[in-house]
Image (cartoon, rainbow, N blue to C red):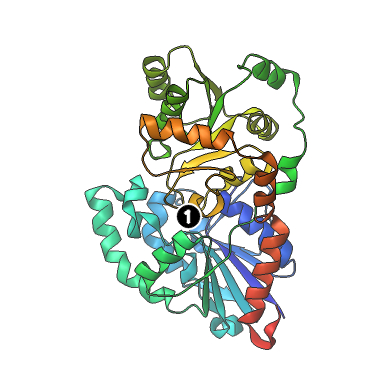
Amino acid sequence: MSGVLVHEWLARAGGSENVFETLTGVFPDAARYCLWEDSGGRFAVDGETWLARTPLRGRKAAALPLMPLAWRQLPSVEADWVLTSSHLFAHHARFAGPARDVPKLVYTHTPARYIWSPEFDPRGSGVLARAVGAAYKPLDRRRAQEATAIAANSRFVAERIARAWGRESAVIHPPVDVAAFGRPARLDEGEQRIVDALPGEFLLGFSRFIPYKRLDLVIDAGVAAGLPVVIAGAGPEEANLRALAAERHPGRVHIVRAPGDELYRELLQRALALVFPPIEDFGIVPVEAMATGTPVIAHAVGGTAESVLHGRTGALVAEWSHEGLREAVEIALATSPDAGRARAAEFAEPVFAERIRAWVGEHTTGGAA
């Protein structure tokens, strides 16, 4: 049986791109379509939408109003099934020709957060964005009814799908390259100098430097536990983050800007614990930390509450107070690295591949993809 894989836009890096890359490995003979392909050679596709041929290419916010229309004007293809990887409007996809009426399966990273959950996405917080979001809700819900079956990347997202689209969904957690995080990092000389300048023991925060990632709470965890903090990443909030560090935990917060893959892995392996405060749809970084044997302190709400096991692979925090953080650090540091590695293995790429292949097979003609 032949299939088609569909993604939103394709960039050089990103969690959803990692999922799509795994899907292309699971279904190597499937054709591939997206809004536009800007991955710098990471992906090869069979087609893009007409938006890719306009000045709106790559301009996600400006192109957004036209995305639902573009997804309805895909070319004629021959396929027995369509699998979309959707976090915005990819589930609206409709092909002409033989593929128009075949089973359409939707792997959902989340229903568009700026429409359905603006509290988790600053793009949906403005008055105009809320008005536009309200206008798109009926259309988005109607298009979701076209799906033969829907899978969510977490129970947290499955609940959002039920509220937003009125649909049930299977839960298939996204793939994590667990094996890569089990091996020692290979640092170049510059990276080694960065590591050598860090304290011997520290709590780690890693994400983009943007408000909703709540890196201020990583600093607070260091204050509560009396431990140094390393914050790794990059983003527009760097200056504010440095000022906050100087005020709350002077001299004990170290910022590592935009670490590469090997340095990131080394930081995870060296950290006493990863502190991961945001409410995420799933959260791949905590699983990567557990794969190195490092415990995780994470929010008790959201996808991290499904991967991190309180008292076994880290600590889940409901109240991010001084006392709550102090207790969470104590709980996390008492856990076993082996328990973390065993838990991470449950989210490895082969596990995802087996589950997604079985799910597609279940909902396509003949029971096999």
Residue 232, given in percent of the width and then of the height, sits at 55, 28
Q: Answer above or below: position of 307 versus 70.
A: above
- Residue 81 is drawn in which quadrant? bottom right
The answer to whether one can see residue 206 in this image is no
Q: Answer above or below: position of 156 versus 330.
A: below
Residue 243, given in percent of the width and then of the height, sits at 38, 18
- Residue 220 is drawn in which quadrant? top left
Q: Is residue 73 left or right of residue 44?
A: left
Q: Is residue 26 left or right of residue 174?
A: right
Q: Is residue 104 left or right of residue 4?
A: left
Image quarter of the C terminus? bottom right
Residue visible at 45% across and 33% down in the picture? 327
- Looking at this rendering, what residue extends furthest in the top direction? 251
Residue visible at 36% across and 67% down in the picture? 164
Q: Which residue in the protein does label 1 denote? A: 54
The answer to whether one can see residue 348 in this image is yes
Residue 69, given in percent of the width and then of the height, sits at 41, 68
Residue visible at 56% across and 52% down in the picture? 307
Q: Answer above or below: position of 75 versus 340.
A: below
| Front position in the image: 218 or 46 | 218
Mark 1: amino acid? Thr
Residue 157, given in percent of the width and then of the height, sits at 45, 61
| Front position in the image: 318 or 358 | 318
